[in-house]
Amino acid sequence: MIRHATAVWYGPGKDGKGTITSQSTVLNETQYSFLSRFEDGIGTNPEELIAAAHAGCFTMKLSINLANAGFSPEVLTTKCNIKFENLTLTESKLILKAKVPNIDEAKFAELVKDAELNCPISKVLNTKISVEYTLE
């Protein structure tokens, strides 16, 4: 399986601007720029997209882990904070709120750790990854 996205950039660095289009067109010529990346400009940025990818990947991996262990989550909500310092991704922090009936804390922690280490996006990121969770 191959997935793809396309970025197009017009003009020089700080004064330029671009668009990103994903294969599914969920992103369809979505604006990005120096301002949307380093300040508060309108549009997306690569770090925001990595955060979305990591949150989605981790959450799906955890749901699979739970199902394989015989548990059915009612809801898993994950926020991902990407820390971007000195032009380097230094951390991806996953903050999870979960409602999973009939699971004990130790088993849940084990399945969370496996998802943290083994979701495909975690495997590709070369940064510190951490998970903070609340189990209801």
Image (cartoon, rainbow, N blue to C red):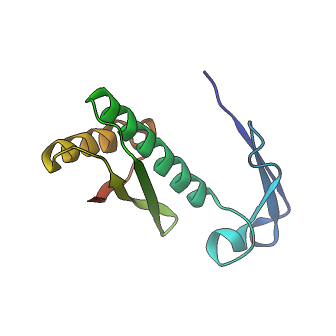
Spot the residue most to the top.
Answer: 1
At 74% across and 37% down in the image, what residue appears? 24
Q: Position of residue 45 (x, y in %)?
A: 65, 61
Q: Position of residue 117 (x, y in %)?
A: 30, 40
Q: In the depicted view, which residue is nearer to us: 127 or 99?
A: 99
Compared across the picture, whether 23 is left or right of 72 comes to: right
> If the image is split into quadrants, where does the C terminus sit?
bottom left
Q: Position of residue 68 (x, y in %)?
A: 31, 27
> If the image is split into quadrants, where does the N terminus sit?
top right
- Please determine whether, in this image, residue 100 is positioned above or below residue 37: above
At 51% across and 56% down in the image, what residue appears? 51
At 33% across and 40% down in the image, what residue appears? 115
Spot the residue most to the bottom.
Answer: 40
At 58% across and 60% down in the image, what residue appears? 48
Spot the residue most to the right.
Answer: 10
Compared across the picture, whether 108 is left or right of 122 comes to: left
